[in-house]
């Protein structure tokens, strides 16, 4: 698996996604969206090394994800995100990656603005700042402030919250697969991923851990979900695989981030579910 400047970070779509309609297993992007509103919430995930293999795998890894999602189907969705990861190789000094991101997505999925800052252990800073939009004919494009530039992204593109809402909609309809092209502003801001989502059987029993048994989750249906991200044009193996339990209201727990030579585990250690914002 290859690494981008978003290396060792999850994509921006852990929080929310489109309008209910049935979708059959194996379909592509046209169709369903979540019927249950996305929950505004603040979640903390503790990262640790679950599995490692090969010469490039770290000897240990620790980190944290701070994830804040808010908004509504009227006002759009705002996400602030930070992932701090420290990887200790078998020899040499530890490597630290600090990624911070703020995004806003229109409720109808027509526009997506983003600003991401990545800092590594050598204090090298990379900024990506821009706005993507979909034209009436379905074609998507992006205009970047940093680094300056423009790009055509193609058609049938989903932004992160829209993508997650589609996944929930497929799961609600009993579907098992979703193929989609996803744009999240990562790398240089011009990258489109082809994704394949596999959805497991619904889980109705509440989680046994204290956070999963909290009021915001204990009565909410969830599904085990695995999303493979492929670089466009390099589809022999995924860039990485993100697996998690996805609740019907868009909250996620039990993260696994598979980079091929190692896997990080993300335990949901703290969760605050906010009151929904009424539509104006």
Image (tube, rainbow, N blue to C red):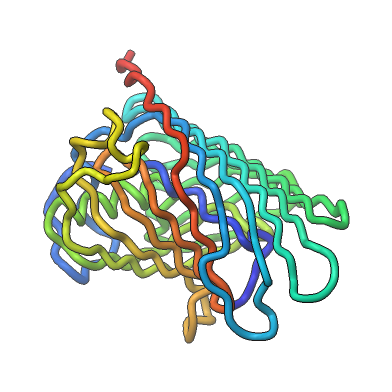
Q: Residue at left 69%, top 85%? A: 55
Q: Nearer the viewer, residue 65 or 233?
A: 65
Q: Residue at left 72%, top 45%? A: 117
Q: Residue at left 17%, top 44%? A: 20
Location of the N terminus (image quadrant): bottom right
In this rendering, position of residue 187 left or right of residue 51: right
Number of callouts? 0
Q: Nearer the viewer, residue 19 or 12?
A: 12
Q: Position of residue 188 (x, y in %)?
A: 68, 59
Above or below 93: residue 142: above
Q: Nearer the viewer, residue 58 or 248?
A: 58
Q: Position of residue 233 (x, y in %)?
A: 52, 80
User: Can you tell which quarter of the image residue 116 is in?
Assistant: top right
Above or below 39: residue 142: below
Q: Residue at left 31%, top 17%? A: 279
In this rendering, position of residue 27 left or right of residue 88: left
Location of the C terminus (image quadrant): top left
Q: Position of residue 103 (x, y in %)?
A: 55, 38
In this rendering, position of residue 40 left or right of residue 115: left
In this rendering, position of residue 90 left or right of residue 218: right
Q: Position of residue 118 (x, y in %)?
A: 73, 50
């Amino acid at each position: 698996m290859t690494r981008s400047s978003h290396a060792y970070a999850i994509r921006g779509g852990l929080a929310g996604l489109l309008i209910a309609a049935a979708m059959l297993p194996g379909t592509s992007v046209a169709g369903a969206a979540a019927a249950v509103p996305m929950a505004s919430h603040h979640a903390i995930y503790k990262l640790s090394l679950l599995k490692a293999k090969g010469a490039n795998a770290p000897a240990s890894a620790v980190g944290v994800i701070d994830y804040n999602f808010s908004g509504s189907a009227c006002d759009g969705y705002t996400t602030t995100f930070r992932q701090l990861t420290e990887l200790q190789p078998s020899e040499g000094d530890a490597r630290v990656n600090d990624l911070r991101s703020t995004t806003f997505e229109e409720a109808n999925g027509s526009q997506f603005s983003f600003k991401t800052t990545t800092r590594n252990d050598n204090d090298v800073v990379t900024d990506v700042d821009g706005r993507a939009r979909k034209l009436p004919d379905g074609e998507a494009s992006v205009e970047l402030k940093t680094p300056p530039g423009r790009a055509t992204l193609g058609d049938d593109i989903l932004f992160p919250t829209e993508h997650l809402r589609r996944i929930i909609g497929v799961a609600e309809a009993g579907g098992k697969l979703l193929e989609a092209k996803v744009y999240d502003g990562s790398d240089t801001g011009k990258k489109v991923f082809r994704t394949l989502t596999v959805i497991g059987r619904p889980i109705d029993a509440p989680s046994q851990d204290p956070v999963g048994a909290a009021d915001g989750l204990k009565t909410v249906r969830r599904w085990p979900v695995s999303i493979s991200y492929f670089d466009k044009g390099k589809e022999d193996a995924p860039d990485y695989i993100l697996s998690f339990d996805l609740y019907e209201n868009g909250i996620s727990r039990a993260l696994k981030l598979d980079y091929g030579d190692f896997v990080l585990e993300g335990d949901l250690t703290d969760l605050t579910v906010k009151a929904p914002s009424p539509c104006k």
